[in-house]
Image (cartoon, rainbow, N blue to C red):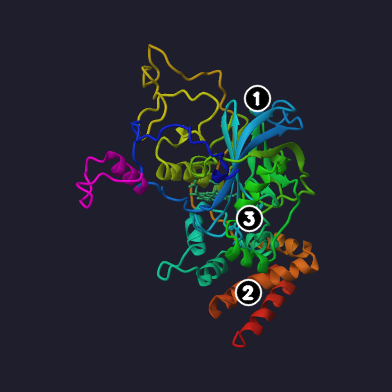
Amino acid sequence: MKSTDIPMDKSQGVLTTGNGNPVAKNQTSQTAGPRGPILLQDFHLIDKLAHFDRERIPERVVHAKGAGAHGYFEVTKDITHLTCAKFLNKVGKRTPIFTRFSTVGGELGSADTARDPRGFAVKFYTEEGNWDMVGNNTPVFFVRDPIKFPDFIHTQKRDPRTHLKNPDMQWDFWSYVPEALHQVMILFSNRGTPDGYRHMHGFSSHTLKLVSEDGSFHYVKWHFRTNQGIKNLSADRAAELEGSDPDYATRDLFEAIERGDYPSWTAYIQVMTEEEALNYKYNVFDVTKVVSQKDFPLQEVGRIVLNRNPENYFAEVDQASFTTSHMVPGIAPSEDRMLQGRLFSYPDTHRHRLGANYLQLQINRPLAPVLNQQRDGPMTLTDNGGRLPNYEPNSFGGPHESHGVRELDLQSKVEGTVARHSFELTDADFEQPRALYNLLSASEQQDLVVNIAGNIAKAKLFFQHRIMPHLKRIDGDFGSRVEAILRQTNPEY
Ligand code: HEM
């Protein structure tokens, strides 16, 4: 239902000011005489304008454009041997969720069909507090150290001088950071333009941990596979929709749920023991790499179903704040340094975007009780702890730490010297992009080659020349085919 579909009912109550005074006139300001100036005493007018002036909060610095929906997660397979997370402790158990899908680089009003990864964020309102699974529709990412993230994102945004998108910036950066090319190939394949949000998979991308009651743990990667089937848009169709229906994916999700065609995804995990993970042929903490499903097959866990549209976009979708550091007992972070960077960055940006009390907003508030000594701050929405002591330990009452609660995720062994240990670029960085290229059908390869060459051709020749050896190192055929198009486009290549 759209807001304009609400049945006409004029008896829904008398209009009031923000402080609850009934409003007699909402069409005319108070003036001194019929042609005179407006009076400062017209609180209704002034409050209305002042509130309007403050309607915009900072948009997300990335993933600004998105759509969301409510639903549930249901356990379909028993994994209690892997985790003590209570929401996973019984087949058939359901947990309410809120999911937000998004594009990455564009602003709040940008087109849904842009060539971009898609965000895939799920908030699980469990009985032990919220778990946020903040993933993408791709199993890998462009960079593997958070210190590179702001620079990378700047290359995807607007040129600081012209305010235009600038292919020089992205190919300049990628030619210096070729570990990004695995994700770049996914981006320029047809998966870079999914047909709406319902027809794509979701991935944790990072390795996480599942932890058992006795403190033992396994490394896992989460996969959410669409039950609607993968569907992508051709580059031409995506470009056409950017103009004719820029909110294509938002509309598609909303309308499907409205007509009762509830989208669902089956949740799987790849499971590795500590030993298997540490001895794997690739570094499982390097988010530019996948872990082969042949080596570690998908194991089903449950499914998510989206069956309710938000009532109010701003309150529920825009104010939703997903945070990789929101984890429940039984789920823990791994040593993946990108993930470690994200554990800091998300709550930090939420405090900036929504304020210190962002977790008190209805969409972010856990269903589980929140009891602590945090107090005050702008826009406190709860009873603020009432008369209970605002410190702990104390001799009076209120919530207190409990030694019965085990911190399950503090058992990792770490060793070594403190230094800026860098990932060296090796042949291994080119193996998975090569495997990806060879996995594509002939027509998918052709689309990838045409899409990527079309974009490289927009960058200066200097950058075209610098990226080419990396593309050839991935695969000679791939590089040569891209180069042939670049030559055709520009005889000076
Ligand atoms: C959103 C930072 C990597 C998925 C965001 C936001 C920030 C951010 C600041 C805006 C959040 C908000 O305002 O609500 C970072 C940093 C990264 C990183 C510092 C690397 C160090 C990743 C990766 C993924 C990812 C690897 C996927 C695997 C998302 C998603 C959102 C998001 C899905 C949107 C969440 C929503 O719908 O509200 N990121 N990000 N990010 N990021 Fe990242």
In the displayed orientation, state which residue is furthest to the top: 396
**Which residue was labeled with disc 3?**
288
Residue 115's spot in the image, x, y percent? 61, 62
Residue at 68%, 34% in the rendered image? 73
47 inside magenta stretch: yes
> Dot 2: what SS?
helix
Q: Is residue 207 left or right of residue 46?
A: right
In whole angstroms, how far apart are the C-alphas of marks 2 and 1?
53 Å
Say which residue label 2 marks. Answer: 454
Q: Residue at x 33, y 31 (%)?
A: 21
Residue 89, percent across and down? 70, 26
| Residue 475 visible in the current orientation | no
Residue 309 rendering spot, x and y as whole percentages? 60, 41
Query: The disc labelled 3 sits on which kind of residue?
Result: Thr
In magenta, the rendered stretch is: 27-53
Disc number for residue 354: none
Reply yes or no: does residue 359 show up in magenta.
Answer: no
Q: Nearer the viewer, residue 124 or 146?
A: 124
The residue wearing badge 1 is: 213
| Residue 299, percent from left and from top | 77, 39
- Rate crowding at label 1 as few (under 14), some (14 to 19) or many (20 or more) other CA atoms within 10 Å: some
Whether residues under marks 3 and 2 lie with C-beta atoms below 8 angstroms apart, the answer is no
Disc 3 and disc 1: Cα gap in Å?
31 Å
Tell which of 62 and 144 is nearer to you.
62
Quarter of the image with the N terminus in it? top right
